[in-house]
Image (cartoon, coloured by chain):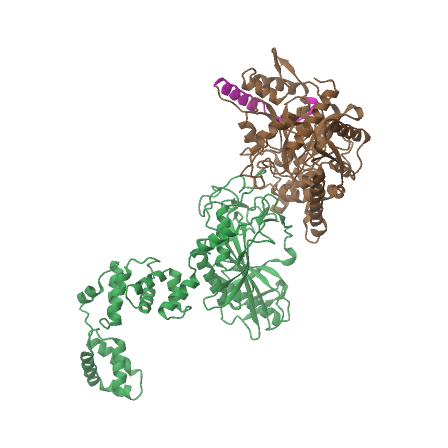
Chain colours: A green, B brown
């Protein structure tokens, strides 16, 4: 399963076999997430911040780093960065900008303006749905680079290409880099972290946070160690383009490191590139090759020191965050806040709707189930009026509709964007059986299926299926499955 | 003689030598801007061959601009306070559609798509840009010998340098090519050539004149300012170009300076500081003129006080770390990717190297290397970090000195204009030319050089007046007083 090629310091591991950790090691992982802010214009100029337009249409002297051009900080970007910080429980503080110097063709000034030792947001945390807190070291503002496209090589790679084209539309787009502490212990926690972070960013309107479009990018710092041992050497994994890949990449990388350590090798601190196609990470550059960025205070900008009134206003304007929404829904329904149904409903933004169904008199727990099952395509503002769904649920919980019938009525409501549940039920001929009628049918079936009945009485639980099926058939679907089961159990004992 | 008369006659019309007089005559219809221009074009044709003040004379554009001014006057519109005044612009300020070279081969073929704020404001005030003046490449030098396009010779003695880096702008005014010109001053680049050419030169408070469109050398030190034949013209130009610019984040948020009104106020009761522990090295002929200036001010009612500036002697060293450090970053954008010179090579890094090797001159390369080194990991604290501390100490020295004095007086340059080639092989000797001018750049304070008689070989000597932040009014009162005493001592005009 595992092959070594020591000359390349590369190990081939069968990925995705589920056993990413070998006995006795633990994973230590911290994520660095870059998000593009949903501002109208760029971080330091008036060009539009828009994805997907004709190349080099959103450019100006500042974006292109023309001689003499100077940056002017975008107020809206600062506000969105503050929103992110406050939503992640950070302290918003006075901050400065530095220059990070390095040459790259899509970096027009040959330096990136970024926050360095005094970032705008520090010391926060993000709570995973299960309750675990992941520390946030900082969330700072910086500008994005342009985008290079390499022509003539295989698969768009620079290697073997004949020339490169640069699109500067993305250059200068505001980014916030959210640096998490190495508190993540499993690939699943990493996935949860990014999913939760994404939801927060979308909820507060800071970013559309689309990993596929690159408006949210994630790098993972991965190391392994024996419990209690000092931190291991870490590798930084880049080019992870989906939540699913993130889990796979971390899993692979942890495994690679463990295999190396078990073979008596040392881990080399390096940046590694995740290759989606072969499911492996590959060396990009080692620590020794790292650039010396020669950071120094950006003399073209003045310190950024948001006053307390501004911070308070941004805080007050924050919408309810996903975690609060889940807690609110969990409290209303009695379902645990990290249950799948709660997660799904809040992610879809349908929690207000579910609560509205409750307000309209419907059982909010049933509303949760029905909305989750039947409203996947409906978005945060379903077409079915909350009162109509409540009407259907009232019939269901009152016993006037079986769960099967309820589903049918629900289907009609969804298909027609609402309607009167009582009328639909009547039109379908749904009349709930009363108990004596149901008992009569049950007795008939027991008599007709005496063999199954005997088996069931003898302890063969499987036999119940045949009996229930026959009863449902005899009742023309009007029988409530739960009531039938209860009756059968009562009659056996 | 101090106030050499530059008045001359064109077709029976006398063209005044000062911008103020020209603008008055053009605004009132007494003179045509086109006639003013042609007189200066003729003057340029006569002497530019031996002086080489310009990288480019923009006669066609200037004629079109002068015709617009005349049309405005004819139509009863006021063209502005600099109506029809020819002005020379240092060739490190962006002019839309007109080559801006910084006297470097690396900007070969580049035409800015925008005007610097200063250029815009001058045009809005009715000034007529007559050409782009020569400078030490990227403003790095004190003699305008470091230009890729040749030396600018001193109009007072064409075997000698004009000073630098704004040598072209100083020489243009001294030769009567234009009554006023614009330079930039990072460590003395306006004041020192002003002194060597016998004209007035002002470096205003950092942030009073926009740097937008000034090609950066050292962003935290660069400041734009005027040259003129008399003090009032510099006041006039500064009033027109100063004031907040939203395109420059370091621009002070206040209106334009108000200076002409204070020129007649005199210096009665003003405290003029002499620095007792000033770094030595000034030639006796220069020191003698400083003493004469002190006497003149005292005679005019000023009070002489002694102040100490113990950190001033470290200014030169600090400057030659801070300025190159910023320059190494500011000049990194000249990489051959987007504009200017490109020398093709097999891969990107080789292209960078070939382009920058061919495009930059020796002094620029020297400073890029020095600055890169000073910012490098492991050296930052010992060099750049320490230089920043010295910068703070110098500011503190000034703060203390300005509790005792309203202005400080020093020589502008330790020596008069030196022969071309005399220091070109000795960078350190050249750097010493800026020993008196550098401290104010480090502190961000205003300072100006006023011609005050002659020294060795009958060459002009300048006296430097320094003032605290936004102390321009006091500074100009002292300058005007020195000018009056010179006119009086030379028997008036």
- Residue at the farthest right position: B284
Q: Is residue B338 above or below residue A415?
A: above
Give residue A7's position: percent from left, percent from top. Answer: 63, 64
Q: Tell me if residue A115 comes above or below residue B416 in the rendering.
A: below
Q: Is residue A491 above or below residue A148?
A: below
In this figure, what is the number of numbered marks? 0
Q: Is residue B227 left or right of residue A210?
A: right
Viewer-proximal residue among B403 and A348: B403
Q: Residue at x 18, y 83 (%)?
A: A444
Magenta-drawn stretch contains B42: no
> Quarter of the image holding residue A354?
bottom left
In the rendering, at what x and y percent does residue B326 appear? 65, 44
Left/right of residue B1 with respect to residue B72 in the rendered view:
right
Provide the residue span drawn in magenta: B49-75
Residue B145 appears in the picture as rendered: no
Quadrant containing the N terminus of chain B in the rendered view: top right
Q: Where is residue A329 drawn, in percent x and y?
A: 38, 66
Q: Which of the image's four quarters has the C terminus of chain B?
A: top right
The answer to if B65 sits in the magenta stretch is yes
* Residue A254 in view in this figure: yes
Could you tell me residue B474's position as x and y percent?
A: 66, 32
* Magenta stretch secondary structure, dominant: helix
């Amino acid at each position: 399963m595992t092959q070594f090629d020591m000359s390349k310091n590369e190990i081939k591991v069968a990925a995705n076999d589920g056993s990413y950790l070998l006995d006795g090691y633990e994973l230590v992982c911290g994520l660095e997430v870059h998000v593009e802010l949903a501002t109208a214009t760029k971080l330091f100029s008036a060009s539009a911040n828009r994805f997907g337009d004709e190349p080099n249409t959103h450019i100006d002297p500042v974006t292109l780093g023309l001689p003499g051009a100077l940056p002017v900080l975008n107020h809206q970007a600062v506000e969105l960065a503050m929103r992110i910080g406050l939503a992640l429980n950070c302290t918003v503080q006075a901050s400065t900008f530095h220059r990070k110097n390095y040459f790259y063709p899509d970096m027009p000034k040959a330096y990136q303006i970024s926050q360095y030792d005094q970032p705008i947001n520090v010391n926060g945390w993000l709570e995973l749905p299960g309750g675990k807190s992941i520390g946030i070291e900082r969330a700072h503002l910086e500008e994005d680079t342009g985008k290079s496209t390499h022509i003539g090589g295989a698969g768009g790679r620079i290697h073997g290409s004949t020339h490169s084209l640069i699109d500067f539309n993305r250059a200068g787009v505001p980014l916030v880099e959210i640096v998490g502490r190495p508190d993540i212990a499993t690939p699943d926690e990493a996935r949860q972290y990014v999913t939760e972070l994404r939801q927060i960013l979308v909820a507060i309107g800071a970013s559309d946070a689309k990993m596929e479009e690159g408006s949210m990018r994630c790098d993972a710092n991965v190391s392994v160690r024996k419990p209690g041992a000092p931190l291991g050497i870490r590798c930084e994994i880049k080019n992870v383009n989906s939540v699913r890949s993130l889990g796979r990449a971390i899993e692979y990388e942890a495994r690679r490191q463990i295999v190396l350590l078990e073979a008596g090798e040392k881990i080399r601190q390096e940046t590694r590139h995740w290759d989606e196609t072969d499911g492996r990470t590959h060396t990009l550059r080692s620590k020794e090759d790292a650039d010396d960025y020669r950071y120094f205070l950006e003399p073209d900008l003045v310190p950024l020191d948001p006053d307390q009134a501004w911070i308070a206003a941004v805080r007050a304007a924050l919408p309810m965050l996903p975690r609060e929404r889940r807690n609110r829904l969990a409290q209303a329904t009695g379902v645990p806040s990290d249950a799948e149904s709660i997660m799904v409903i809040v992610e879809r933004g349908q929690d207000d709707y579910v609560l509205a169904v409750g307000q309209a008199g419907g059982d909010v727990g049933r509303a949760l189930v029905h909305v989750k099952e039947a409203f996947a395509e409906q978005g945060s503002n379903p077409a079915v009026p909350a009162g109509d769904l409540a009407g259907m649920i009232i019939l269901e919980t009152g016993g006037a509709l079986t769960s099967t019938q309820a589903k049918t009525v629900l289907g009609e409501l969804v298909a027609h964007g609402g309607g009167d549940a009582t009328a639909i039920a009547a039109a379908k001929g749904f009349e709930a059986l009363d108990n004596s009628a149901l008992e009569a049918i049950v007795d008939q079936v027991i008599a007709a299926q005496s063999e199954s009945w005997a088996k069931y009485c003898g302890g063969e639980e499987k036999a119940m299926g045949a009996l229930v099926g026959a009863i449902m058939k005899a009742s023309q679907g009007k029988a409530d499955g739960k009531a039938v089961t209860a009756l059968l159990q009562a009659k056996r004992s | 003689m101090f106030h050499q008369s530059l008045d001359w006659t064109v077709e029976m019309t006398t063209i005044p030598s000062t911008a103020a007089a020209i603008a008055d005559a053009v605004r009132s219809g007494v003179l045509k801007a086109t006639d003013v221009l042609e007189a200066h074009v003729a003057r340029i044709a006569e002497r530019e061959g031996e002086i080489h003040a310009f990288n480019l004379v923009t006669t066609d554009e200037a004629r079109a601009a002068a015709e617009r001014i005349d049309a405005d006057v004819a139509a009863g519109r006021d063209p502005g306070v600099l109506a029809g005044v020819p002005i020379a612009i240092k060739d490190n300020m962006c002019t839309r559609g007109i080559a801006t070279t910084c006297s470097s081969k690396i900007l070969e073929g580049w035409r800015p798509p925008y005007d610097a704020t200063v250029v815009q404001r001058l045009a809005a005030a009715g000034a007529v840009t007559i050409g782009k003046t020569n400078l030490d490449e990227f403003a790095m030098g004190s003699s305008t010998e470091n230009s890729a396009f040749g030396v600018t010779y001193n109009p007072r003695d064409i075997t000698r340098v004009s000073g630098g880096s704004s040598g072209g702008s100083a020489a243009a005014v001294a030769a009567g090519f234009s009554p006023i010109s614009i330079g930039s001053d990072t460590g003395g680049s306006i004041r020192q050539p002003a002194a060597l050419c016998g004209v007035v030169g002002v470096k205003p408070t950092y942030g009073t004149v926009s740097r937008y469109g000034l090609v950066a050398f050292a962003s935290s030190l660069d400041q734009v300012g005027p040259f003129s034949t008399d003090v009032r013209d510099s006041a006039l130009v500064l009033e027109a170009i100063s004031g907040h610019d939203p395109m420059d984040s370091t621009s002070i948020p206040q209106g334009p300076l108000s200076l002409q009104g204070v020129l007649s106020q005199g210096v009665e009761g003003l405290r003029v500081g002499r620095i007792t522990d000033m770094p030595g090295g000034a030639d006796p002929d220069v020191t003698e003129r400083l003493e004469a200036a002190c006497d003149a001010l005292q005679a005019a009612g000023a009070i002489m006080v002694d102040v100490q500036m113990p950190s001033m002697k470290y200014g030169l060293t600090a400057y030659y770390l801070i300025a190159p450090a910023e320059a190494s970053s500011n000049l990194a954008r000249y990489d051959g990717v987007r504009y200017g010179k490109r020398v093709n090579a097999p891969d990107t890094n080789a292209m960078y190297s070939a382009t920058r090797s061919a495009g930059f001159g020796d002094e620029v390369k020297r400073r890029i290397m020095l600055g890169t080194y000073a910012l490098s990991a492991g050296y930052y604290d010992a060099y750049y970090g320490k230089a920043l501390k010295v910068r703070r100490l110098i500011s503190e020295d000034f703060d203390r000195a300005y509790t005792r004095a309203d202005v400080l007086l020093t020589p502008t340059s330790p020596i008069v204009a030196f022969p071309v080639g005399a220091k070109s092989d000795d960078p350190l000797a050249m750097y010493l030319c800026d020993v008196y001018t550098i401290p104010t750049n480090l502190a961000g304070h205003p300072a100006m050089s006023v011609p005050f008689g002659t020294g060795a070989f009958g060459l002009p000597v300048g006296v430097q007046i320094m003032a605290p932040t936004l102390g321009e009014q006091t500074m100009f009162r002292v300058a005007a007083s020195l000018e009056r005493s010179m006119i009086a001592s030379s028997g008036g005009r």
